[in-house]
């Protein structure tokens, strides 16, 4: 049985957010090695979101009960998110606020 690809509006927003964070992080690098690494991280992150078991009910990665990334990618994404998170308010303020609200709502549900 093949799982469906998640394409709902909430997952699409999560993909845009992750993509924005990856773009912000790799903007500081100009060499080919980092360009290849960026492409690899993007592909991996998007594939994980495409097949996320929570689908439209997916919380933000920070509060997600299931960490679906391999260890090497998890460490890389944590580095990316730590760097990009504060900068999101500058480059993508609306997206940043929506992301924080989503996280806050999930925490309150528990």
Image (cartoon, rainbow, N blue to C red):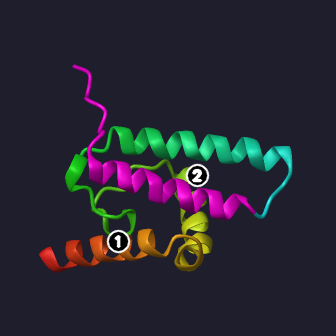
Left or right position of 13 against 41: left
Magenta span dominant secondary structure? helix
Residue farthest to the top, as pictured:
1
* Quarter of the figure with the C terminus: bottom left
N-term-proximal mark, 2 vs 1: 2
Q: Is residue 74 above or below residue 110?
A: above
Marks 2/1: CA–CA distance: 28 Å
- Magenta stretch, residue numbers: 1-27
| In magenta segment, residue 30 | no
Residue where numbered disc 2 is placed: 72
Residue at the spot x=49%, y=57% of the render? Answer: 18
Disc ID at residue 18? none
Residue 53's spot in the image, x, y percent? 25, 44
* Up/down of 43 relative to 77, above or below: above
Specify few, some or many for label 2: CA neighbours under 10 Å numbering under 14, 14-19, or 20 or more.
few
Q: Is residue 13 magenta?
A: yes
Q: Is residue 110 visible?
A: no
Residue 28 in percent (x, y) is at 77, 64
Question: In terms of image quadrants, where is residue 8?
Answer: top left
> Residue 92: x and y, percent?
52, 70
**Closer to the camera in the image, 20 or 57:** 20
45 over 14 or under it: above or below? above
How packed mark 1 is, by other alpha carbons closer than 10 Å (few <14, some 14-19, many 20 or more), is: few
Q: Mark 1 sits on what residue?
A: 98
Tag 1 secondary structure: helix
- Asked if residue 73 can be seen in this view, the reply is yes
Element at label 2: helix
Nearest to the observer: residue 78 or residue 43: 43
Residue found 34% across the figure and 64% down from its top = 60
In the image, farthest residue toward the left: 109
């Amino acid at each position: 049985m093949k799982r469906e690809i998640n394409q709902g509006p909430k997952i699409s927003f999560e993909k845009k957010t992750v993509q924005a964070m990856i773009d912000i992080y790799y903007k500081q690098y100009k060499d080919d090695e980092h360009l290849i690494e960026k492409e690899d991280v993007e592909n991996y992150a998007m594939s994980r979101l495409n097949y996320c078991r929570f689908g439209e009910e997916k919380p933000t990665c920070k509060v997600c009960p299931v960490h679906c990334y391999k260890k090497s990618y998890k460490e890389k994404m944590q580095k990316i998110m730590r760097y990009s998170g504060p900068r999101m308010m500058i480059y993508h303020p609306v997206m940043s606020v929506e992301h924080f609200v989503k996280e806050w709502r999930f925490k309150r549900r528990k």
